[in-house]
Amino acid sequence: MRLAILLILLLTGFTNPVETPNLDNSTLKGKPFHNITLEASLKPFKKNDKAYIQQVATELFTQWQSLLRHTDTVSVMLWTSDGSEILDYKGNLNQPLEWARYIGNPNTEHEVGSGPKDLSLHERAYLYLENPPKFTYGDLKFIIQTLKETGQKITGKPVRIGATFDPGPEFAKSEFKYKKHPEILGGNAMGHKTMVSCYSTLNADTEAYAGFPKGIPANTPFGTFLGRQSQHFLTDLGYDFIWLSNGFGFGVEGWSSTGATFTGKAFLPEKLANTKELIAGFWNLFRKECPKFQIQTRGTNLSTGADLARDGVDLKQIYGGKYNMLPPPNSPWAALDGDFGLEMVGYMSRMAELPDERYLFRYYTHDPWWVNSPWLDRYGQEPHDIYLPMAVARINAKGEIRLPTHLNFLTADNSYGELPAQVPDEVIPHILKARYDSPTAPGPLVWVYPFDEYHTWAYKQPDRLPEIYYGDWLIRQAINNGFPLNTILSTGSFQQVMTEKPAFFNESILVSIVPETGSAFEKKLIDFVQNGGKLLVYGPADHAGAAFLNLLNLRNGPALEDEFQVNSSINVDKLTRNYPDKMIHQALFSGGGIATQVKNKADGGTKILARVTQSGNEREVVWVREKPEWNGGKVAYVRGTNSSRFTGGKLLAPDNPEELFTGPLLMRYVLKEFGVDYRIDKRNPSVKNPVLTISRSSNGFLFSGYCPNTTITHRFKLPQGAPILTGYETELADGFSVYSLPKAWHRESRFFIDQPDGMVSCQEMTSGVQRMKRCVKLTGLKNATVRIYPDDEVTEQGLNVYTNAGYPWKKGKTAFKTGDKKYGKHYVVENVTGDLVAFW
């Protein structure tokens, strides 16, 4: 018998694939990615040895294989140097390669490894190994080929390799940038004139380069030089795409709140047109020389509106250039300083419109240069920067929910060239869980982003640059204070969706600026409210048209700025020491002064919620309005203020919350007027507020959060009742579900209850019944009304509800009814005391 088996093996061959289930990936859950990119430096290749290089490549793909099953294509993006390997390339594969073998900045006045020990890594770099290997361009080509071949064998997927260009001094020594051609430097992100400007020009250079064998002529545009060098470099070495890093191609100041068109003291609209032309010139010149290779981009650390107003970055022009590019992903601000508001606003505002339907999410696992591994240290192995940005959904003009098509990891290796398997082992389950729970419908709040309006106003109404700048900063601060915003579409897409699917946003609150006078968008918003919709309007109303002013019951008086007393009736948070009642409003950073007033204070449908006063002058800054003929429609208005200031650093500095009221809190507070009531108990104003997203997935509600301070208490109530988080217990208080939550959390709610108090538990269990996918049990109910949200595909016939019963479910079957459609698809059980089990 053994001989027969051996003979069969010899005849068929040991390498023939074994027949296994799931060859069509039918058991994989979640929507697959188009591409997953593992970013890496050359540091793991600690020996210039072919066998060793093969072993490193094998380990890289093996570590990530359980995730790579969920993609069509795999990519590796190589942080070989700082992009100077492209600039220096002469077309000779035997040319020595200057590569990123350092920890810290190697382009300072101190030589690598020299100087006093108390110098920081930003002042002096070290070699990552005592004797790092030496490589040539030919060796790099071998590494690229090995990664492609090894990755394809392990994953069964096509493997693409990307090159990187960074404008700064961080990663490798650059004679080209800092000694031969300092004239190309313009940005100041890492010191005075340390960053390459995409629209700079080169001085003459007699040295031969791959694309310029006779040298560089004087006044050669940098876009021309980089494009031609890239074409040679990418082709000769076998690359498939190029990544433009750290804001390159998007202005000069990728990290700053100021730039070419904003000094921190004044906006410079006269520079906008020329800056737009210079940036467009770079893209066109680059593409003329390097026409086919895909471009991927890092973008800036800020947002669409802020970038346009401060640095002349015309994203609409760049997206419309047909450059075969991917849009910028989320920035790493949340990892660097916990600024989720800025990360989320940048991420969402840049996806409101896109070159096509592709966009990417990027996660910060390791840093190969600066001795930190964010998953292990900055995040403390907490997944908040996975679940929060992956709760974001984009809605296109067809009313389709669009998720990230690409996923990047910066990086697979750490600063010492190690590939710790611990990190993918711990990160992958959270990535997959977030993908499984991805949004399938608009969230409770939907940001209608003025992508087209901002790009029109910047040139045709340049006096509105402060307003363009301000809008994104307000939303950034609102998100950082618990405003649960994570769904976005553009104003243009909104109009198309409302025409084709007028009920699409019936369960959502729209969040919008004041629309352009007489525009189609203005009419759509008015119609939305007057036909039962819910709308939250933010920002100045200086340019509002008569129809919208009438909707809001608003008039503008003389604009005021500087210090105000705040009188608010909607401060819902509970503090041991209350928020201050003083506020500073700087017109330059807040879209002008405060001019808003309720026009007709006798209007019975208008409720004023917050006022500010200054020397006897009063301005209304928050109110809501509704009318019986609007069929449940309601509009809220929040003037808002930018509770931060310019102090000369990279970002605007928030006001001290112990001294000044944080104006953007009012964005969250006013939501209770729509029934979305999220309250926080904390000790004092300086305790940082949590970040929250609420998304909809397969008819459920997914709550995700980040708590900078875990001593706070969270209180939740939505229009349909108190949300009950699966797997947790809550002590109900005044109809709110109350929770103490960890640093990072992600929980589903499929049950909402009306019950004033009591301890309620919600736990997953097994039904013991064939073909049932879910079974969830509530305990501690007291005369409760329970609203149940089963999965999208579950019908009334497929839902089973039992009270005070258990397996084998011979008794206790409980009748339910279809719930009010204004709360979406759900079923209601009334007057429940004890336990309730629902399975489907």
Image: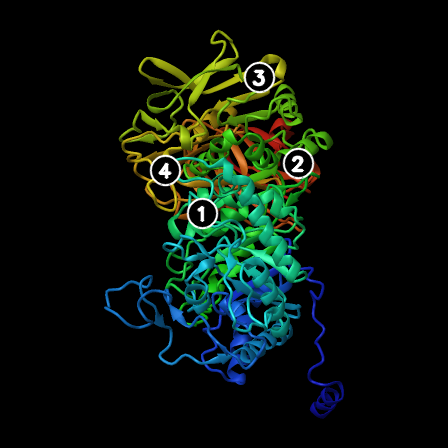
Mark 2–mark 4 distance (CA, rounded to whole Å): 38 Å
Mark 1–mark 4 distance (CA, rounded to whole Å): 14 Å
**Residue 776 makes an appearance in the image:** no
Asked if marks 1 and 2 touch (Cβ < 8 Å), the reply is no
At which x and y percent is residue 701?
55, 40
At which x and y percent is residue 672?
47, 26
Asked if marks 2 and 4 touch (Cβ < 8 Å), the reply is no
**Residue 770 makes an appearance in the image:** yes
Question: Amino acid type of disc 1?
Answer: Trp
**Residue at label 2?**
493
Question: Amino acid type of disc 4?
Answer: Thr
Within the image, what quadrant is residue 449 found in? top right
Q: Could you classify mark 3 by the number of other residues whose Cα lies within 10 Å: few (under 14), some (14-19), or many (20 or more)?
A: some
Residue 745, numbered circle: 1
**Circle nearer the N terminus (1, 2):** 2
Callout 4: SS: strand
Tell me if residue 361 comes above or below residue 134 in the rendering.
Answer: above
**Circle nearer the N terminus (1, 4):** 4
Mark 1–mark 3 distance (CA, rounded to whole Å): 39 Å
Tell me if residue 817 comes above or below residue 487 in the rendering.
Answer: above
At which x and y percent is residue 505?
63, 31
Mark 3 vs mark 4: give the one in front: 3
Callout 1: SS: strand
Q: Could you classify mark 1 by the number of other residues whose Cα lies within 10 Å: few (under 14), some (14-19), or many (20 or more)?
A: some
The N terminus appears in which quarter of the rendering? bottom right
**Residue at label 4?**
713
Q: Is residue 690 left or right of residue 500?
A: left
Question: Amino acid type of disc 2?
Answer: Ser
